[in-house]
Amino acid sequence: MKIIRCLLILGMLLLLPACAREILPPVTEYTLAPVLQMPASSGKPLSMSIKLSPIVASQVFSTTDLYYGEDDFSRNRYAYSRWEDTPVNMLQLVLQDGLEQSGLFRAVLPSSSMAEADALLETTLFDFSQHLQPDGGSVAVVRMRFYLMHEQGRLLASKEFESRVATRTTDAKGAVAAINTAVANIVQDLVLWLPQVLGR
C-alpha cells in the first residue's frame, strides 16, 4: 500500500509543473463609448436644468462582467473579457454627455451634484447583454425605462426604450460593438422623446 501511495504522490508532483506552465489568455477590457448622433436642435435650449438620478439595475449590471445568454433566463459571463467599469457607471456618463450634446437644457447635472434642478431623470436598466440566437447569430439588447420627474417629485412621464442590434461576430468584441450601437440608439430616442413631454 505504501508503494502505491508513493507512486500516486509522485505522479501528482510530476503533473504540477505542467499545470504551472499553462498560460491563460490575457483579460481584455472594453469600454462604452458610443458614437452619439444628436437630432438637429429645434430652437433655443429650454430655460430649465435637469439632474440625473443614479441608474437602478440588478446586481449583474453593477459589476464589470460582460454577459451573454442562450435563452431568456440564463446569463453567463465571458471568462477573459470584461468592462473597464460597471455598465451603470458608464451609462450614467453617456446619458449626461448625450443630453449635454443635445442642447435641450440650460444645464445637465450629474447625480453627484449638490445643486438643485428643475427636473429629475430617473433611469432603470433592465438588459445590457448579448443574446445568442438559435440560428448561430446573436444580438445585443439594451432595455431602459426613463422617468421624468418634476422638481417637486411629481411624475411627468415615463417611457421604455429597447434597442436590439445584430452582432457582426458572436464573440465578446462583436457584442461590445453592438451594445455601443444599441446605447447610441436609446440616447437618440431619449433626446427625441424629452421635448415632446416638455412641450417644446
Image (tube, rainbow, N blue to C red):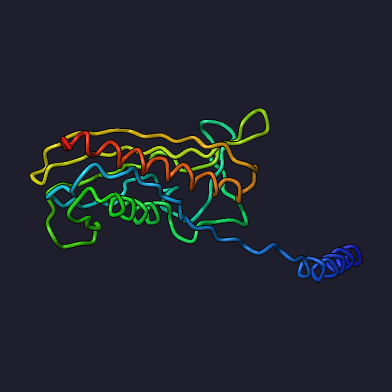
Q: Position of residue 139 (x, y in %)?
A: 56, 36
Q: Nearer the viewer, residue 153 or 100?
A: 100
Q: Position of residue 10 (x, y in %)?
A: 87, 69
In this rendered view, identify the residue nearer to me: 153 or 18.
153
Residue at the (16%, 41%) spot, across then down: 149
Task: Please identify the residue farthest to the top as the structure is shown.
Answer: 134
Residue appearing at x 54%, y 56% in the figure: 82
Image quadrant in which you'd find residue 197: top left
Residue farthest along the left direction in this orientation: 152
**In the rendered image, which quarter is residue 108 located in?**
bottom left
Q: Residue at x 60, y 61 (%)?
A: 28
Residue 198: x and y in percent read: 17, 37
- Viewer-proximal residue among 149 and 17: 149
**Looking at the image, which is closer to me, 24 or 113?**
113
Return the x and y of residue 150 as percentages of the image width and height. Answer: 12, 42
Q: Is residue 93 above or below residue 131?
A: below
Q: Is residue 163 above or below residue 14?
A: above
Left or right: where does residue 175 sit relative to residue 144?
right
12 sits to left or right of 109: right
Residue at the spot 52% in from the left edge and 39% down from the top edge: 140
